[in-house]
Image: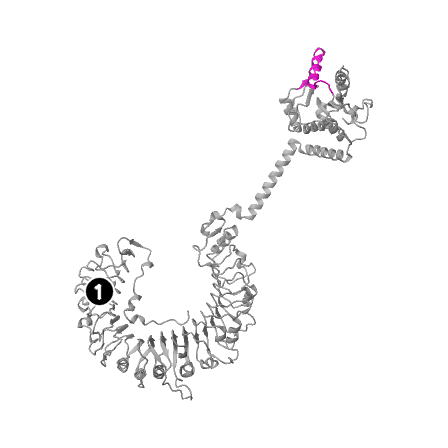
Amino acid sequence: MIGELISVGALLLGAVSSQFSPDPSSSSTFISDEGPCRIYNFGLSADCQGKQLDFVPWRQLPVTLESIDLSYNELHVISAADFENFPQLRILLLQYNNISHIANEAFKNNPLLEHLNIFNNSLHEIPASPLTSLLNLKELSMSNNLYRHATLAESFSKLVRLKVLSLGGPLVMGLKKNDFQPLKNIQLQDFAIKCSSNLSYYEPGSLEVIHTKRMGFDMAIDQRPNALHHMLRDLANKTLIAIQFRNLFEFTYYMGDEDIFLNLKDIRAFQLIFHRGKFNENLLKMALLNLQVTPIKQLRLQYIDFARSPTFVDSGAGSSITKLSLDKLDLWYISNPDVLRFDWRFTWFKRIKQLSIQYVYFSSVPCDSWDEMEGVELLDVSNNRLNDYVLYNKRCNYEGSMPNLLTFNLSTNALTSLEDLSSLTKQFRKLQVLDLSNNKLGSAKESRHCVWTQNITCFIAHHNYFSSEAFHCLPTTVSYLDLSDCNMDQLDLTYFKKATNLKILLLSGNKIKFIPSKWESPSLQFLALDGNSFGLISKASFQHMPQLSQLRAGNNPYHCTCELHAFVQETIAIGKVNLTDWPLNYRCYHPEPFLNTLISKYFPGQVACDIRLVIIISVATTAVVILIFVLICYIFDLPWYTKATYQIIQAKYRAHKENLAGDIGNFNYHAFISYSHSDADWVRDQLLPCLENNKNPYRLCIHERDFMPGKWIIDNIIENIESSRKVIFVLSRHFVNSEWCNYELYFAQQRAMGKTFSDVILVLKEPIDPSSLPSKYCKLKKMLSTKTYLEWPQQVNQQPFFWAQLRSVLGKPTMTREGTNSIRSRNSSGQLSGAY
């Protein structure tokens, strides 16, 4: 991000064409993929690149084409018919083929052609005749062919719109003065010339007629070093943006004493680039000495094979390069890091404003190097495999060093200690931007006792390994903090309270599992949280960030809930916070039915999300349920049944507690008689005599006579009902109104639970309408409607038949054991009788 490249490589070998090559993938509008070429951009472009074509498939191409890419094929000849059907053609790319011949009328029907690339083919002559009709041509790349000379025909003088031109090839042995005469009235932007690596001649004045902004040389002067004198003299007094020399010395190091860069002092250019080639100390010294007195402001040495000079003399009195003043110096991909300590000192860095040293892989940083870089405002030492021990020497005194440094780029190295970096840079009083990305920083052990200069406003540390403890070692003065892709799973919220100037925070691509609700950052304006691991986000997540206006939080495994829906709806509606990557990057991860559903299309029901409505519905539903329950209790007399069941349980518990000795047995009585006190006379005068005063008498149980004195009434009822084979209910209106009769009926029902009530005998002493019975007598109602019952006849003559029926229902009066509990002698007017 620091130090943009000013590219001049487009001047060389026709590489300029790559700037204008159409990108087939840039358009999503395709017409056809049939045939060897892909037609796209609404039929205006054809991509035939790399299809191993040995002919132009013009029959399969639409006549509407404006751009055709036939590069990287096996074309040998361009005929007159190949492009005659494309009158709208503007861009034609033919580089990297094997074209040896172009017909004179090949481009006759292409008057609109602006960009032609025939770089790296097998042409033996410059195709002047085919180009004659291309008066609109702006860019022509025809270098790296098999020309033996670079002489342009007079027809090139008509290409007045030409802006970019590259020509020459490995067989061009040199340049002549008249080679470029046709270009004397053409104002170019870019011009590049390639000659043989074994340059044989260069006539002075060969480049004088060239008017261009950028000049590129691809010629080795190993055999003709003096040719550089003439090249530079031809460029004198021209105003150029950039000059690039490629492989100036390709095979040998310059060992001469003559200053071949002497004429560099007359060059008016902004940038000078040396790309590839061999440099030694002597040659570099010649270049730098002359650069000291030129207006050139930028120097780049890239892919240079540097070596020490055995004849280099160091007087020891000081460096000879002390006045080199450059806005920018780039040292990239230098084979020998000794190039940094030119003539064993660093004084050539003293007046450099922007210094970029990349891929040099130096293994030491002497103490005096920091003091010499007093004018450096931007220092870029990225991509050098630097570790803490190489960069920071505790024996050095850094006080007062780098007084003008504003930006320090240490990205893509092997640094691990934030503490050491803070110790190194705390003396850099003007430092504002620190780039530490792509290192190994952030461990808790190496992040202690950090003291930073108070001027740092931009801290870039993406692609490291930060733990939450490392936040204590970050500068709190920053307004821009980038901790993306740092493998963090949680945050230290105390840091953000201290970083009161923080405006932009990038936390993308981490493993943060949740957003704390108490996250305070009073000045934060932009927050990036995309690509993390949290699934919940709500309005409360950012309530303590009053200045937040932009949020990027997509590509997280969101749980689609009402809370998330409310956050999205309110955020979009109010518009205070702009979701910069909404809506395509926001998808549901949970629950499973909504997997990969766009959150913008997730609409939960109002009932599910409105808590007030849920409360109202819940309260109303509860009230209705309670009302229905009360109503059921009233209709079916549930309290009475509850009370009766409780009475049974209590009786069972008391019986168990008393632990009666022996087995009571199931049948002490043939029948238990349940009747109302109002019907006692009928029971004593009619029922008992007819059943007990027989030859084979029945043993009957009635409460007035047979209940055990002193026992609970409920216990007596349950015990005697369970000890009786049958239960006879004497039904009358008085029976229905008797509470104890109701208990006896209920207990009999409980005893008969799961059976068919065959042990229950109903005797209607008087007619009863079942529908008039209370609701609690549902079982009695059922029995009256489904079970045969006996009715006591009022006519005397029918009564013998009634007794015969009753004895038949009771069965034979055979007892299984002697009744041990009979209390017949008990006074029938005992205290129990009044209870019924």
Q: Residue furthest front?
A: 310
Q: Can you give x and y, in whole percent of width and height, for residue 226 in the image?
A: 27, 83
Q: Is residue 56 left or right of residue 428?
A: left
499, 380: nearer the viewer: 380
Residue 793 seen: no
User: How many residues crowd mark 1 within 10 Å: few (<14), some (14–19), many (20+)?
Assistant: many
Q: Is residue 213 left or right of residue 100?
A: right
Q: Can you give x and y, in whole percent of width and height, for residue 467 in the image?
A: 53, 64
Q: Which residue range is magenta in the image?
A: 789-814
Q: Quadrant of the C terminus?
A: top right
**Mark 1 = which residue?**
99
- Residue located at (68% from left, 21% from top): 762
Q: Can you give x and y, in whole percent of width and height, for residue 676 in the image?
A: 74, 23
654, 258: nearer the viewer: 258
Residue 811 is a magenta residue: yes
Which amino acid, mark 1? Answer: Ile
Q: Is residue 68 above or below residue 282?
A: above
Q: Can you give x and y, in whole percent of width and height, for residue 385 in the image?
A: 45, 71
Q: Quadrant of the N terminus?
A: bottom left
- Residue located at (77% from left, 34% from top): 659
* Image quadrant assignment for residue 236: bottom left
Residue 730 is a magenta residue: no
Q: Is residue 645 above or below residue 218?
A: above
249, 462: nearer the viewer: 249
Judged from the image, the secondary structure of the residue bearing numbered disc 1 is loop
* Image quadrant assignment for residue 189: bottom left
Q: Is residue 794 left or right of residue 246?
A: right
